[in-house]
């Protein structure tokens, strides 16, 4: 057993829920640590050991379970599942930290107090299966921008306990992509089939505590280590000036942003050498700070219910495409040109010249329809899409929110959609061409 010096009711609730789901042979067969919650301040959890796989079949089962886990994390609106929060235990990826199940949706904290709460921030990545942090994802860290993968499924850290071994050979997720997608489709189809049951299941979590994360924990830890430097320990003023680094991004704002009060709360905790951590019930839509400010959120349980309602076969296929892309881009050695695998190509060598414009038109319409079906709308940012972030220095790519650029962002997409709309015949033109 492991002593947990914090509330672990969320992990215990998830553990008991998965115990019930495993009773159905067609259901979700994931494992989580057995837990004992003593009170809101501490509890005990089962020790999960890092174990290698004994056969190729076990590796395949492990990655199928990863697909099931991706589906569960998507439906429960969970993020922050990085390499330290998941342990590879034989054929099971076991989550050992569930602080962010049903995490709430942030409003735009850059707005001033009078306008606060109007715009809910939810870009395309945050609304997709990629948001959990489980899927492979490149990241840069440190002063020199070292490339790393700190995701729950695939880590470049040599000592990470989430790495999957067959004997002494590391097994990479991009070699088992089909097993991951099979597990995801099986689990998400099961959830869709029992939608009413899962709506009630989601609702049952509303009293458990979740953790709103305003900024990555590693930023807190980096700042905390800097604060241990002797030059920041001479007096309180020097120490507090260093902590004010958290507010530098807000200095350009003309109005008094709502985020300022939240950062004041972070600063108090860091001044006492604590990592800032906020907790609210999963079914709550506001958090009261010690300075009396009520910081409103969108309720995480409500957002999870809306995700469940939006599930349909087309959306599921899109999430599977994102899983495949994440695994392909995660290749550390380059798996070859896998982007064309399974693609259907049209042989244009036998097409007459007079047929080519119509073929081009039909293809363009399919592309436009596909782009439109993959858009995400939020009040704060309008429509947004998932695009590619090219890490030129490292020769890598990864999925990212499309920016505002003309060639690789929302401006270019808007231009294409606008042009397509202009090219559609008007009702008058249609009447002229009709018999």
Image (tube, rainbow, N blue to C red):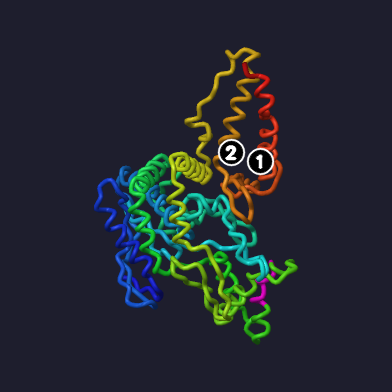
Q: Quadrant of the N terminus?
A: bottom left
Q: Is residue 56 magenta?
A: no
x then y, percent, for residue 120: 58, 59
Q: Residue at x 51, y 42 (%)?
A: 325
Q: Residue at x 48, y 63 (%)?
A: 299
Classify 10 Å Cα crowding around label 1: few (below 14), some (14-19), many (20 and above).
many
Q: As drawn, is 340 to the left or to the right of 433?
A: left
Upstream in the sequence, badge 2 or badge 1?
Answer: 2
- Residue 136 visible (yes or no): no
Q: Which mark is residue 371?
A: 2
Residue 173 to residue 210: above or below: above
Q: Is residue 246 magenta?
A: yes
Q: Main secondary structure of the magenta part?
A: helix
x then y, percent, for residue 178: 41, 39
Q: As drawn, is 29 to the left or to the right of 349?
A: left
Relative depth, front residue between 99 and 136? 99
x then y, percent, for residue 342: 47, 30
What residue is pinned by disc 1?
413
């Amino acid at each position: 057993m492991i002593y947990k010096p914090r509330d672990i009711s969320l992990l215990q609730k998830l553990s008991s829920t998965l115990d019930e789901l495993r009773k159905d042979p067609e259901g979700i067969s994931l494992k989580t640590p057995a837990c004992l919650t003593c009170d809101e301040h501490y509890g005990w959890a089962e020790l999960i050991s890092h174990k290698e796989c004994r056969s190729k079949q076990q590796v395949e089962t492990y990655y199928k379970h990863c697909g099931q886990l991706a589906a569960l994390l998507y439906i429960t609106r969970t993020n922050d599942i990085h390499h330290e929060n998941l342990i590879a235990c034989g054929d099971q990826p076991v989550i050992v930290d569930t602080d962010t199940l049903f995490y709430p949706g942030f409003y735009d904290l850059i707005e001033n107090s009078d306008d606060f709460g109007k715009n809910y921030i939810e870009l395309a990545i945050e609304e997709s299966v990629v948001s959990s942090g489980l899927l492979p994802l490149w990241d840069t860290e440190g002063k020199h921008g070292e490339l790393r993968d700190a995701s729950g499924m695939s880590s470049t850290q040599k000592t990470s306990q989430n790495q999957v071994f067959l004997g002494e050979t590391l097994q990479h997720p991009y070699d088992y992509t089909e097993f991951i997608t099979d597990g995801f489709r099986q689990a998400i189809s099961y959830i869709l089939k029992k939608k009413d049951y899962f709506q009630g299941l989601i609702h049952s979590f509303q009293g458990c505590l979740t953790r709103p994360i305003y900024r990555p924990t590693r930023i807190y830890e980096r700042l905390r280590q800097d604060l241990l430097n002797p030059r920041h320990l001479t007096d309180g003023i020097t120490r507090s000036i260093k902590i004010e680094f958290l507010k530098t991004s807000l200095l350009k704002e003309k109005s008094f942003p709502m985020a300022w009060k939240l950062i004041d709360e972070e600063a108090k905790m860091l001044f006492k050498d604590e990592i800032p951590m906020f907790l609210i019930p999963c079914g709550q839509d506001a958090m009261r700070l010690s300075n009396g400010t009520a910081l409103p959120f969108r309720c995480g349980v409500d957002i999870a219910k809306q995700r469940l309602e939006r599930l349909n076969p087309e959306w599921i296929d899109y999430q599977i495409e994102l899983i495949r892309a994440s695994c392909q881009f995660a290749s550390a050695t380059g798996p070859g040109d896998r982007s064309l695998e399974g693609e259907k190509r049209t042989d244009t060598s036998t097409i007459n010249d007079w047929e080519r414009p119509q073929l081009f038109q039909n293809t363009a319409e399919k592309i436009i329809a596909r782009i439109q079906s993959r858009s995400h709308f939020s009040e704060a940012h309008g429509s947004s899409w998932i695009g590619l972030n090219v890490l030129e220095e490292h020769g890598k790519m990864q999925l990212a929110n499309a920016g505002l650029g003309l060639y690789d962002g929302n401006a270019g997409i808007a231009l294409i959609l606008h042009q397509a709309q202009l090219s559609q015949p008007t009702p008058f033109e249609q009447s002229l061409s009709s018999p």
